[in-house]
């Protein structure tokens, strides 16, 4: 038996990729092996998960922390690593003020620590790599999109892929060192000299819809509730079909 996940949004359509109930329900031990600082407020945490069954870019997992007194905290996190990174999973977490799980990761966790994970979860937002992908994200919403970009590069895929990513400033741009010609950054508070500052606008989206591949784009939007609605509206106004917009939101 399989399950599908349908986000609560008028822009989304039911997923087309099945998820294994067995894999999604089995907890596994994940050992933290590396911590990489991405921005002043975000870091990537790399885990060894020997029995990880693999995932598709865009999927997420459930992470469980258990305190010495038995208290349990669980959170959903998007997977940042590409599927070909066998036996390992990477998560990129913002340090959320007052967040008990993100706070633990950013202030306590160190290589050698163990947590529990299960997944991968949700086939709705997954990208199989077989269709042109227009990726639109803001802040930590770029995490599942980076898994897609990394797979595109690692496998040398010829299918078109473009990324629009929003950040407050260059210092807050997660994965800044990894972007190439496929990426257009948008800065909302401060930017390098000569780069406009402001919210993502029609001027950022329209060129991509005007020069889209013959089969059109499959759009993947990830970010806060407000950003997801704003970005999706821009896409629709620029001509992107509503039924070819997939949204993952948080907050």
Image: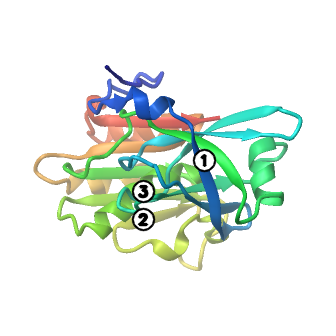
Dot 1 or dot 2, earlier in sequence: 1
Residue at 86%, 41% in the rendered image: 68
In this view, 113 is above or below 131: below
Q: Is residue 204 left or right of residue 210?
A: right
In this view, 17 is above or below 5: below
Callout 1: 10 Å neighbours few (<14), some, many (20+)?
Answer: some
**What residue is pinned by disc 1?**
29
Is residue 249 or residue 127 the one in the foreground?
A: 127
Query: Can the viewer see residue 200?
Result: no
Query: Can the viewer see residue 156?
Result: yes
Q: Are marks 1 and 2 in contact (CB under 8 Å)?
A: no
Residue 25 in the image, given as x and y percentages of width and height: 50, 29
Q: Is residue 238 left or right of residue 145?
A: left
Dot 2 or dot 3, earlier in sequence: 3
Helix, strand or loop status at disc 1: strand
Question: Is label 2 or label 3 in front?
Answer: 3
Q: Is residue 123 left or right of residue 131?
A: right
Residue at 18%, 46% in the rendered image: 216
Helix, strand or loop status at disc 2: strand
Callout 3: 10 Å neighbours few (<14), some, many (20+)?
Answer: many
Residue 130 in the image, given as x and y percentages of width and height: 19, 50
Question: Is label 3 or label 1 in front?
Answer: 1
Q: Which mark is residue 147?
A: 3
**From this viewpoint, which residue is outermost toward the left?**
214
**What residue is pinned by disc 2?**
184
Q: Is residue 149 left or right of residue 28?
A: left
């Amino acid at each position: 038996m399989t399950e599908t996940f349908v986000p609560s949004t008028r822009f989304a359509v039911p997923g087309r990729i099945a998820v294994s109930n067995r894999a999604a329900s089995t907890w596994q031990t994940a050992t933290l092996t590396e911590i990489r600082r991405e921005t002043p407020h975000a870091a990537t945490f790399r885990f060894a998960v020997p029995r990880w069954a693999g995932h598709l870019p865009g999927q997420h997992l459930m992470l469980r922390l258990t305190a010495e007194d038995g208290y349990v905290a669980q959170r959903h996190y998007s997977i940042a690593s590409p599927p070909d990174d066998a036996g390992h999973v990477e998560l990129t977490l913002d340090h959320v003020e007052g967040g008990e799980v993100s706070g633990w990761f950013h202030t306590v966790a160190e290589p050698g620590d163990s947590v529990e994970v299960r997944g991968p979860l949700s086939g709705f937002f997954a990208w199989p790599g077989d269709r042109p992908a227009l990726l639109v994200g803001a802040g930590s919403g770029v995490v599942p999109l980076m898994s897609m970009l990394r797979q595109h590069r690692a496998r040398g895929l010829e299918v078109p892929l473009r990324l629009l990513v929003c950040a407050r400033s260059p210092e807050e741009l997660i994965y800044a060192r990894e972007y190439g010609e496929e990426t257009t950054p948008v800065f909302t508070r401060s930017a390098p000299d000569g780069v406009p500052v402001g919210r993502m606008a029609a001027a950022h989206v329209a060129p991509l819809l005007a020069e889209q591949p013959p089969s059109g784009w499959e759009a993947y939007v990830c970010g806060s509730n407000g950003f997801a609605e704003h970005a999706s509206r821009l896409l629709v106004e620029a001509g992107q079909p509503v039924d070819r917009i997939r949204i993952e939101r948080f907050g």
